[in-house]
Amino acid sequence: MSDLFNSLEPNDNTTLWRFMDLFKFIDILTSKKLTLSNLTVMQDPYDGLLHKSIRFQFVDVNGNPEDPKLESESDQVDAHKRMNDSARRLLYISCWHENEFESAGMWDLYSSQNGIAIKTSAGRLKKSISFSNYKEMDLLKVNYYKAESDYFIPNRPENHIYTGILNKRISFEHEKEVRLIWHPRDYENRSPIRKISVNLQELIECVYVSPLYDAWQLNSIKEMINQLGMNIKIKKSDLYELK
């Protein structure tokens, strides 16, 4: 990645969380792979779409800017559609929550009473997937905008393929999202889901189980991890315990 998005890069010590249900956690443990999805499967239909105010600079065959008067409104609409379609199909993401502490809201939103949360850091996440081997990957914070003036546009033409994926409406600010973004170049693969190998021992600082777990459920998770031969710290969230 160039320096276009330096201001959105979390430092390696940034604490990250991944909240999920039990089945997704079992999948990570047994496959030793991290799942990334493209934006066509996201619940928010605006996710990845460029702000409608962004205009594109058209160039001729030699790369020289064309006369703005030649750019019709239909050209701009078509350019938006092409960029939005490309970003939503070609970019794959894994979503993480930036927070030094547990989030009650994230437990409620992204896990059930059988939920699991993986605690890690930006540095551990990058190292766990042999980041240097994935040249098409970046780890960047999402920018939340209220008005057009809050929209993050890198210091280059606005039609960078990441621009839409790194801006979300202010209504989602509670997510405090950091996105692992992968732009694989095997364009013939149209699957909305991809998986990449991950070193779980490197990735996981600690596994938290839902504060609603019973003791036997916690013990079952510990036993499963032991049987898989993994040395992973696991604890029950004390979110609702009196101190």
Image (cartoon, grey):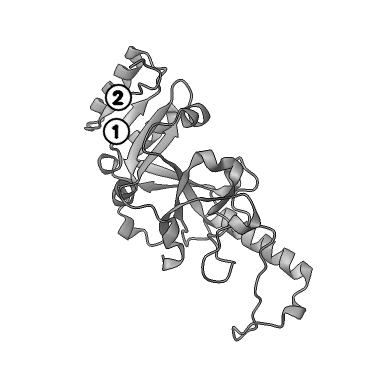
- Amino acid at pointer 1: Cys
Distance CA(mark 2)–CA(mark 1): 8 Å
Q: Earlier in the sequence, mark 2 or mark 1?
A: 1
* Disc 2 to disc 1: CB gap under 8 Å: yes
Q: Residue at x 63, y 54 (%)?
A: 49
Q: Position of residue 38 (x, y in %)?
A: 54, 49
Residue behind mark 1: 206
Residue 76 to residue 103: above or below: below
Q: Position of residue 110 (x, y in %)?
A: 50, 31
Secondary structure of the residue carrying tag 2 is strand
Q: Position of residue 199 (x, y in %)?
A: 28, 44
Q: Residue at x 62, y 42 (%)?
A: 44
Which circle marks residue 235 in the picture? 2
Q: Position of residue 134 (x, y in %)?
A: 36, 58
Image quadrant where one finds the C terminus:
top left
- Choose between 155 and 86: the one closer to the eye: 155
Secondary structure of the residue carrying tag 1 is strand
Left or right: where 11 falls relative to 103: left
